[in-house]
Image (spheres, grey):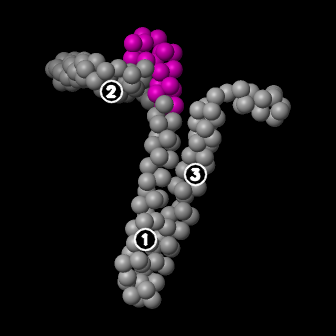
Amino acid sequence: MKTQKEKLKEQKSRDLFCVVSDAFRIFARRSSRVLGSAWAFASAILIIVIWGLTGPTFHYSDTWQLIINTGTTIVTFLMVFLIQNTQNRDAKAAHLKLDEVIRALKGARNELIDLERLSDEDLTSLEKQFERVRKKAERDENTPGRMSRANGAERASRGKGI
């Protein structure tokens, strides 16, 4: 394990973009954990109720309406970046896990690793390939005299007395 001093020296040598990126990642993760909680939702409801109850006091003025409009606009604008950051990280992690499963499975097509980086035309072509495979599987399953895997497994288990 590295000491905090060593980590600090490494961090100083890294470029500013990496430091800011890491700081934002940590902030976004912590914020999403807090802001995605039931307590944050309840707090937002409470703020709206308080704002609504203060309407008669301020005679439902333009300023009174402007306060909630400005507040919600600012919060929404900032939340877009937090949500996008956490979604990007989650998607990247899911893709990497799927890539590892594809790589590890014998018989899997390793060309499918990093699919998210392909062009739209290549993705459309792959989609058509999988559509043909699905249709072929449906035809094979509906062919008279041909036993589907599910039916075969069911018959095999009955034959064994399970």
* Between 155 and 32, the one nearer to me in the picture: 32
Residue type, label 1:
Ile
- What is the distance, in whole Å, between disc 2 and disc 3 at their CAs? 46 Å
Q: Is 160 placed left or right of 129 in the picture?
A: right
- What is the distance, in whole Å, between disc 1 and disc 2 at their CAs? 57 Å
Q: Residue at x 46, y 11 (%)?
A: 106
Q: Which mark is residue 150?
A: 2
Crowding near pointer 3: few (<14 within 10 Å), some, many (20+)? some
Q: Is residue 158 above or below residue 102?
A: below
Q: Residue at x 46, y 27 (%)?
A: 95
Q: What is the magenta range?
A: 93-113
Q: Is residue 155 above or below residue 103?
A: below
* Between 72 and 147, the one nearer to me in the picture: 72
Q: Position of residue 54 (x, y in %)?
A: 46, 84
Q: Quadrant of the N terminus?
A: top right
Q: Which mark is residue 68?
A: 1
Main SS, magenta region, reads helix
